[in-house]
Amino acid sequence: MPVFYDEQTKTFFLEGKNLSYVFGINAAGFPEHYYFGSRIGRDDLRYALGVGGNSAEACVPGMTDSGRNSYNNYGAEISSYGSGDYHECSLQILFPNGCRLNEFRYHSHRILEKKPGIPGMPSLQGGTTLLLTVKDKNSEVYVDLYYTVYEDIAVLCRHMEVHNRTGKTISLLRAYSFTLELPRNDYDVLTLEGAWADERTPQRIPMHHGVVSIDSKTGSSSARLNPFMAVLDRNTDEYNGNAIGLNLVYSGSYVLKAEVGSKGSARIMGGINDFDFQWQLCDGETFATPEVVMVYSDCGLNAMSRTFHDAYRRYLINPRFVMKHRPVVINNWEATYFNFDNERLMGIIDVVKGSGIDTFVLDDGWFGARAADNAGLGDWIVNTEKLKGGLHTVIEYCHQSGMKFGLWFEPEMVNPDSNLYRAHPDWAIHMPGMEPALSRNQMVLDITRTEVRDYIVESVSKILRENDIDYVKWDFNRVLTENYSIALPPERQQEFHHRYALGLYDLCERLVNGFPSVFFEGCAGGGARFDPAMLHYFPQIWTSDDTDAYMRTRIQYGTSYCYPLSSMSCHTSICPNHQTGRTTPFTTRADIAHLGATGYELDTTKMTKEEVAEVADQIRAYHEMEDLILDGELFRLEDPHVSNYFAVAVVSRDKTEAHITAFRTLCYPNDEVKRIYPRGLCEETRYFIRELGITLSGATIMKMGLLLPNTTTDFKTFVFHLKKEDSVH
Ligand code: DGJ
C-alpha cells in the first residue's frame, strides 16, 4: 500500500517509486513534516526532531512546556499565520471581524484509490491519494490537503481545497498549493528564466537567509520564469546528488518561494500568486488550488527530468495523442507572414508535396480584415479577399496533395479594429476611464465572463464544424494588463487573475474535448505559456519564436528540465534566421528541429533544389527516430549555455536503440579533441553505430566516448544512430 498510517505514532508514510514522504500529527494536533527523500523504513521518526539551541519562541496556544512547543519550530504541512510561525505561510484568511489568524489541526483522513480531479483545473491522473482534512481551531474553516504517490514514478502531487462552513463570507488573502519543509539551509535553487525568443535558460543560485522567490504577474505562466523550481544539494549535477523538482500545473500568475529561516531548515511553497489576489469565499463554498508536481531524484537533475517526462506522458498529456506520431508540418508564418493568397499557399505546398511533410498549417492572417497585426483578431470569419473561394479551396488542395490541414487561432484576443470590438467594446479587458495598454495592437478578451467564452467557443467551433480541419494552433500573443472585469463587483476584482486561468481551462475543455479528433498545438508568442496545465490540453507547444538552430539548442535544452521532447514543437526555418540574422547549415537546422515534434516553417519556393531533395531524407530520418522522441529517455550530455557544445542522447526504454545529436557552436583552429560521453546505454549490449560503421559495447561507447571530428564549419551537428547488433539487418 503506497499510503500507510501508523496509528500508534500518528505517522503517515507516502511511498512512491524510490521515495518516502513522511509526516505525523504532533502533540498539538498539527500535521508536522518529518521527511522527504529516497525510500526509508516505516520507523518512528520523532527521535530526530529538534529545535536547534535555546529558543525564544511563542508557545502553541495551550502548551507551556519548554522545547518543541512553538509553531515556528515545526516543519509545516500547512503553514498558518498568527500563533508564532514567522515563516511564509501557505494560507491566509481574512474573517469578517478583521481577524487574519488561523491554526490548522488534524481533523480526519481518508485514502483514495482513485485520484479525484481538481474542480475547474487540469491535474495528473492515477496514483493513490491521501486526503488529510485539517480544521481551523477557531473557526469552521476546513482544509483538505491532497497527496498522491505513484508506484511507477518518483512523484508526489499536492494541492489543497479550502471549505468555508463559517456561515459567513471569508476572504482568502493567500491560498498556495503546498508547503514543503526541508531539513537544511544550504541548498541551491535552479529556475528557468527567459524572455520572448529566449525562453527557459537554467539559472542556479544558492538559497540564502530570507526568501528566494520567482513569480509571474502577467496572467500567464510566462516566458520570463517558468513555474518550475528545483532545490538541489550544492554538489548536485546532472548525474549525481539530490534534486527535488517542483512544477505547478498552472497557466496563470503564480509564485514559488524558497525560504531559509533561523532554524537551519528551508521551507518551499507556492501556487497562485497572492500579489493582487483576494478571493471571496461564501459560506458553503470550496476554493481549490492548482496542483504541484514534486519529483525526487537522488541521482541528479537528469533523472529528475526523466521522471517529469514520464509523469507527464503517463498521467497528464491527452492519451489520445501522447504516443501517436505527430504531424510533420509545413507552416506558412515565416514564409509569408500576413501576405498570402491561394496561389502563394499552393505554391508552398507544391514544392514539398510527396516529401513526407504530411500537414499544411495556415498561420495568422486568414480571417476578418487581417492584413497586418493591427486588425481582425476576434473575427473568426474567412477573409475571402485573400482566400478566394474560401478556406475549403486550400483544404481541398492540401488533401489532393496528400496533406492534412491545420489552422491558426488566437481565441483569447481582439483588435480594437475588428467587428467584434466594434460590437462589444466592453468584452475586452479594460479599466473604465483608463487608456488600455495595447500590445501588438491587440487587447485580451475578458474570458472570466461566460458570454465572452460562449462567443469564442461558438465562433471557433463554427469554423471547425464547417471545414475539414485536423490541427489547430492556439496562440496567445500578449500579457494581461488593466486587470479588471466590468462583470465583477469591487470586492471580487482581485479574483481576476485566477478567474482568467479558470476561463482559459473552460475554453480548452469545451474546444479540445468538443473536437476530439482535432490535434491542438499550444503557442504563446512562442513559448510564453509552456506549462503542465497547457500540456494537458496541447500535447505539443510551440517552444519559441526563435527558430535559429543555435538558440534552439539552448531553449530546447532548458525546456527539457521538465518537459518531454515530444511536447516541444520545433521547426526548420530559412536563413539568415528571422530572429537572429544568423546563418546555420540546413542539415543542422533539421537535426535540432528533429529533437522534438518536427516541422518546417519557410518559403519552400525559395529553397534550393538540393534543399528540397534533402527534406525527404530528413523526414525519413525523423520517422526512424520518432518513437524515441515520443517515448525514449533523454540524457543531456553537453550544456550549450556553458559550453561550445550541445549534446543529448535519446535511448529506447529497452536500451536496444539510441539517437545521439551533438552540435559544435563555433569551430576554432587547433581546436581541442572533443569527445562526448553518451549515457543510458546497456554496458553489455553491442551497438552498431551507423555513421561510423562499427560495432562497440555500450560500456566502450559510454566510457571511451564518441569523437566529434574537427571541421571548418560553425554550427555543425554530428548525429549517431545506435542499434543493438542482433537487431541490425
Ligand atoms: C506568434 C507565434 O509564436 C508565431 O508562430 C505565429 O503564429 C505568430 N504569433 C502569428 O501571429
Image: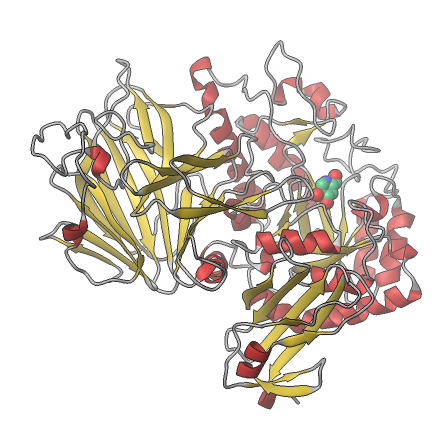
Q: In which quarter of the image is the C terminus?
A: bottom right
- Residue 244 in the image: state x and y as whole percent: 40, 52
Q: Is residue 465 among the parts visible in the rendering?
A: no
Quadrant of res 724:
bottom right
By what rule are the colours in the image chosen? secondary structure
Q: Which of 26 and 342 lies nearest the eye of the viewer?
A: 26
Q: Position of residue 261 (x, y in %)?
A: 32, 36
Residue 379 vs residue 98: left or right? right
Which residue is situated farthest in the left direction here?
A: 65
Furthest residue toward front:
670
Left or right of 530, for residue 176 = left
* Residue 701 figure quarter: bottom right
Give residue 113's position: percent from left, percent from top. 29, 56
User: Relative to the observer, which residue lies in front, 190 or 617?
Assistant: 190
What x and y, as percent, mark residue 227? Answer: 50, 42
* 466, above or below 428, in the image: below
Write down the quadrant of residue 37 in the picture. Answer: bottom left
Side of 397 relative to 482 (left or right): right
Is the residue 170 above or below the residue 354 in the image? above
Query: What's the residue at 37%, 41% (across, down)?
Result: 268
